[in-house]
Image (cartoon, grey):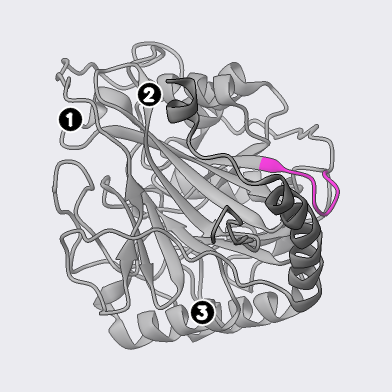
Amino acid sequence: MRAAAEGRRPHPYRRREMRTILPVVVILCLLAGCAPTPPLALPISGTLPASASPASPLPVPEARRSLPLSPSPTSLPPAPAGPDTPPPSRDRAFTFAVTADMRLYSGPGTYDTPRYFRGACEAIAARGAAFMVSPGDVDPPGGVLWTVTRTLGTDFPWYPAVGNHEVETPEDMDWLRSYGTALAAPDGGPVRPGPPGCPTTTYAFDYGNAHFVVLNLYCDASGDAVTDGDVPDHLYQWLAADLAATDKPHIFVFGHEPAYPQPDADTGRVRHMEDSLNAHPARRDRFWNLLRERGVRAYICGHTHNYSAVQVDGVWQLDAGHARGIGDTGAPSTFILVRVDGPSVVFETYRDYVGGAYTLAYTGVLAAPFTLYLPSVMDGQ
């Protein structure tokens, strides 16, 4: 019975042959270079170019329930970030978190419970991240920063992008402009300011072996709250120059609105399907071509409140959905962890299906090191 369970054992000569072959194959592969493993893909609904493919889902819990909502807290004044994150070496592994569209379901008071944004921050704290990027709709931003610093640490670096709701609120834009003037990279390095019109609400920085760009999609030469969500010439030219100047192997670009809006991966809900960056298709396509040509790993956005992950012409779009907990019951609350480890980049999507507990729901590969395939050497083969 034991022999049957273990299967056929290789002949002793074959074992010696395998020991001889394996080092040769490994050396040849390292000398010649090996192709990266392509991202996983399964069909999903939604209109996409023929080249698009989605992320790979994990089993999703069935238990979901809705809970009542409560009034919003008051906004807080800006609190300067004081990042104290040790700098990684070029190839040291690190993780960053993405949350979006939590809006007023943050800050002290009624919403300071795990059923709202605090729950996402607590789940991130339990899993670990070097910093957080929030691609828009963080109003009031002082309340969001309050929750971030009280769950993840007073020096935890947080990088917000401008969303359409901040554009509608002058005091939120004032807060973000002020906050942006004091930003530093997570390791204390410099932040490159954006173009005239939005020098503190568009910015870029490096961390480890990665380059990060946070775009204000409502910026033009005349100001930082003047477009309806677009990548006009002014912003495009700044981005093109920034991407041309980096030598980092991994690049991530953030903006509030998706280029290719998608339904929620679980509920199928649709929002902003026609009035995101696709409202200006020629400029959207020019923007996407630039991301592809510069090898951007992912464009990470929000706006729809719906989580989705699709690959279009070789570039991933990750829509982080919303992180407001039960503040939006049309789709589960979500955060994303992106793990960078040398040449490898993977993402993990966590969703709250029960009103306060986040579980791993989706994973995907944004970049992979070479995969080594070795022959099986057995008796008679």
Q: What type of secondary structure mainly makes up the magenta span?
A: loop
Which residue in the protein does label 3 denote?
292
Contact? badges 1 and 2 (CB < 8 Å): no
Which residue in the protein does label 2 denote?
358
Which numbered disc, 1 or 2, marks the residue that appears first in the sequence? 1
The x and y percentages for residue 20 are 80, 58
Q: Residues within 10 Å of mark 3 (few under 14, many from 20)?
A: some
Check disc 1 and report its element: helix, strand or loop. Answer: loop
In the displayed structure, 352 sits above or below 335; it is above
Q: Locate residue 52 relative to residue 237 in the image: left or right.
A: left
Q: Locate residue 326 relative to residue 33 in the image: left or right.
A: left
Q: CA distance from mark 3 to mark 1?
A: 35 Å
The x and y percentages for residue 156 are 68, 30
Q: Residue at x 50, y 62 (%)?
A: 298
The x and y percentages for residue 207 are 75, 52
Which residue in the protein does label 1 denote?
329
Q: CA distance from mark 3 to mark 2?
A: 32 Å
Q: Does residue 272 appear in the picture of this structure?
A: yes
| Region of the chain picked out in magenta, as a range | 88-94
Is 92 part of what is drawn in magenta? Answer: yes
Amino acid bearing label 3? Arg
Tell which of 130 and 170 is nearer to you: 130
Q: Does residue 232 appear in the picture of this structure?
A: no
Q: Residue at x 48, y 66 (%)?
A: 38
Which numbered disc, 3 or 2, marks the residue that appears first in the sequence? 3
Q: Nearer the viewer, mark 3 or mark 1?
A: 3
The quadrant the C terminus occupies is bottom right
Tell which of 278 and 96 is nearer to you: 96
